[in-house]
Amino acid sequence: MTEIPVTRAFAESLDRAAPLTQFRDEFPMASQCLYLDGNSLGLLSRRAEASLLAILDSWRTYGIDGWSTGSYRWFDLSEHLGHMMAPLVGAQPHEVIVTGSTTVNLHQLLATFYRPHGERRKILADALAFPSDIYAISSHLLLHGLSPDEALVQVPSHDGFTLSEDDIIDAMTPDVALVLLPSVLFVSGQLLDIPKLTEAAHERHIIIGFDLAHSVGVLPHALSQWGVDFAFWCTYKYLNGGPGSVAALYVAERHHGIRPGLAGWFSSDKTVQFDMAHQLIPAPDAGAFQIGTPHLLSLAPLIGSLDMYSETTIDIIRAKSVQLTHYLMELATARLKDFNVRVVTPQEEAQRGGHVALAHPEAVRICKALKDRQVIPDYRPPEVIRLAPSPLYTTYTDIWDTVNHIWHIMHEREYAQYPLKREIVS
Ligand SMILES: *Cc1c(COP(=O)(O)O)cnc(C)c1O
């Protein structure tokens, strides 16, 4: 790593030359604290607030007619937002639909694509996966009368933080029916090589899907080009859609027309939905993977939030994100190594997502001390502090100040005043 000047003035000079600074004022809270938790819950923007109020207003003004009139017709808003989101994941517009929740979408996709047959019955995942994904996989194995102990294979990690793509590929044996992996690992921030893994799975006739929760909105994807079978993601992290905002999914065009595993009347081809027939004619696009009435009030903030993404490109966002995380890692290495704080996110640009993970045995108490200093990180057991610079609103100076706060907390052993117990929500 190159040496960087460890001065606040240097951070300020980086900010003066940085792209995307026009967006920071859109997020009122960004200047009220040091918010490094945009990978858990992104901040409210003025535009998201305005679009939420606009949908409330259409309800007030039109009542039931809001489904078909107003500036944002509710009936096809999910499709409309899917089209807006498609460039963020490198998909064709009709391959993306905004619907459901992250975990519900995974259930839908497993119900659709997990088809155990003959020898091929196993699902391959990884030992560092987000628990909800593992619970969902286990549900589907059990529904098929299989035991997760036997039919769920989790590729182990050698260091507790990262995975080896070669290990994953080696585990793609002829008894595997489906592979589910994260794009970016939620704890360490490692970015997996999606095209390589997809190609390996397809050579072995295995369906492969990705959980994009920690990559969407912060780095580019080319799902269609890579040939990924399916993907799903939440919209309340880097996409700033608000707590519990409606999630999204992608299904490759070649799978369109198949019957959704979990059908409901919103799976229907929209032109005949109101015929109320009992014979489902699924939508000809990713819309078929919807189930019921869209949650309009939780969709609404996304209109404003995605509008911001239409004013820049995901490549510009990624370039800034890479520089912010690089700066953060260099600064943390330079200033915190004496305190045994380790950067556990991969150093190589191609192997890291949008957040940086610092490991220290006192991580819980350091996070508490940070919060008292108006710095918002998050904690992941057993010993990781996650810091996510959001390219739309985090500055280099925010990063300098954050590392400086950690330096003080370590230098003065301030963390030692805090109880060891973590909070219920961390
Ligand atoms: C945040 C996150 C989820 C969230 O699932 P919800 O259904 O929205 O609660 C799922 N997977 C990963 C990897 C996540 O980081």
Image (spheres, helix red, strand yellow):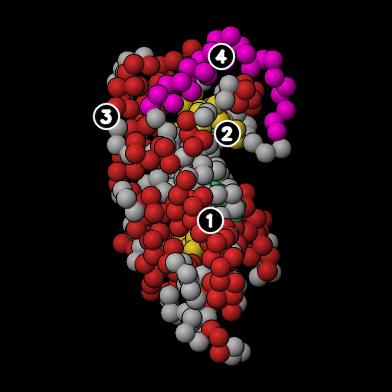
Which residue in the protein does label 3 denote?
A: 17
x and y, in percent, of residue 303 in the image: 45, 57
Which residue in the protein does label 4 denote?
A: 410
- Give the distance between the C-alpha atoms of the residues marked 4 and 3, in whole angstroms: 31 Å
Select label 1 or label 3 by which is in front: 1
Which one is in front, 175 or 233? 233
Element at badge 3? helix
The image quadrant that residue 91 belongs to is bottom left
**Is mark 3 in CB contact (under 8 Å) with mark 2?**
no
Answer with mark 4 or mark 3, whichever residue precedes in sequence: 3
Which one is in front, 388 or 165? 388
Select label 3 or label 2 by which is in front: 3
The answer as to whether callout 3 falls within 8 Å of ligand 1 is no
Element at badge 4? helix
Element at badge 1? helix
Select label 1 or label 2 by which is in front: 1
Element at badge 2? strand
Q: Residue furthest front?
A: 61
Which secondary structure class fits the magenta region best?
helix
Magenta range is 396-423
- Give the distance between the C-alpha atoms of the residues marked 1 and 3, in whole angstroms: 33 Å
What's the amino acid at mark 3? Ala
What's the amino acid at mark 4? Met
Select label 4 or label 3 by which is in front: 3
x and y, in percent, of residue 101 in the image: 58, 59
- The answer to whether any part of residue 371 appears in the image is yes
Query: Which image quarter is the N terminus in?
Result: top left
